[in-house]
Amino acid sequence: MDSICATTKAPMKKLTHCIGFLLSMIAASSAIAANEAVDRPQLQVGDTWTYRQTADTKAGFKEERLTYTLTRVTAKTLYMDQHQDGSNQPPRSVVYASDWSRMRSVNGVETVVSEPLNFPLSPNKTWQLHFREERPNPQRAWEDWTNDFVVVGHETVKVGAGEFDAIKIEAEGKWRSEVVASSQVSSAAQGASGNATISSTVASTAPYQIEGRIYKAFWYVPAVKRWVKVVEETYSTTGVRYERSVHELESFNVH
C-alpha cells in the first residue's frame, strides 16, 4: 500500500487501485467492529435515562415521560427509581436483573418474563424466552408466552436524545390462553298485568382457547448502557394489532 499511495505522481491506474484498497480496508475495519461481541454494561448509581413513552391500546392513546435513575447496583440486581414527569407522587421503585431482564413470581416461582438483551451480544445470536402462568386473572385458566430473539445487527436510529449507531434486536413469538367457562343469567317478566311471572335463562359458555402474535424490537447502544428505542406490539387471534407501545430516549446521563 505504501508503494502505491506514497506519491501523488502515481499513474491514474495505480491511484484508482490505491483508493479502492483504502476503501476496502475501511469497510473491513467497520465489519470487524460490527462483528465484535458487546459485553454487559458497567452500571453505576446515579445513571439516569428519560424516555418518551406512548401506548396505543383498546383503552385509547396515552403519552408520558418517565425518568429512570439507578439507586443501587449489586452483582445480580439493579434497583431503580421511576418518576413520571409532572407527577406529584413519589418515585416508584422497580427492580431489574443486571442484564436488564425483568423477573416476577409465576406460579409461585421467580421467573424471567422479559429478556430483551442476552450478553454478550453478537450478530445473529438467538435465544428464546418462554413461560406459562396458571390463573393469571379470573378470566383466564392459563397464559403461555413464547418469544424468539435475534440480534439483527447495527442500525442507525434517531430519537429525541440524538442519532445513534445501535445494535438492533428483534423478537417474534406467540401468546396463547384459555378463557374459563362462564355463565350468564337473564330474567324476563311474562303474563298479563297483575299476574306476571318471572322466568330466568342461564347461558353457559364452555372453556375455549385463543392465541395471537407478538413483535418486539430493541435498539441498544453500548455508550448509553441501555436501549434508546423500544417497539412492542401484540396481535389478536384474527391477526389484528390491538396494542402498541413505543419508548424513545429523550435524555441520559451515565458515568
Image (tube, helix red, strand yellow):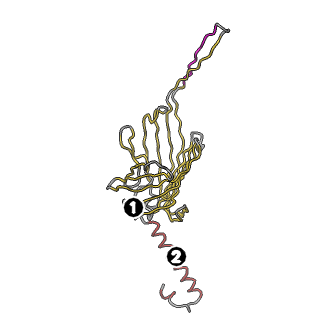
Q: Is residue 127 toward the left or the right of residue 9 in the image?
A: left
Query: 29 or 109: which is nearer to us?
Result: 109
Q: Which of pointers 1 and 2 indicates the residue nearer the eye?
A: 1
**SS type, badge 1:** loop
Q: Is residue 9 toward the left or the right of residue 69 in the image?
A: right
Instruction: Where is residue 73? Give x, y as percent.
Output: 34, 56
Q: Is residue 86 above or below residue 211?
A: below
Which amino acid, by three-letter code, is at mark 2? Ser
Residue most extreme to the top: 195
Q: Earlier in the sequence, mark 1 or mark 2?
A: 2
Distance of label 1 from label 2 (alpha carbons): 31 Å
Query: In this picture, which residue range is highlighted in magenta?
Result: 195-204
Instruction: Where is residue 144? Give x, y as percent.
Output: 46, 40
- Secondary structure predominantly adopted by residues drawn in magenta: strand
Query: 249 or 239: which is nearer to us?
Result: 249
Instruction: Where is residue 114? Give x, y as percent.
Output: 44, 48
Residue at x-position 49% and y-position 29% = 180
**Residue 24 has which mark?**
2
Q: Is residue 131 above or below residue 24?
A: above
Q: Residues within 10 Å of mark 2 (few under 14, many from 20)?
A: few
The residue to which callout 1 is attached is 41
Residue most extreme to the right: 192
**Quarter of the image where one finds residue 195:** top right
Magenta highlight on residue 68:
no
Residue at x-position 50% and y-position 89% = 6
Which amino acid, by three-letter code, is at mark 1? Pro
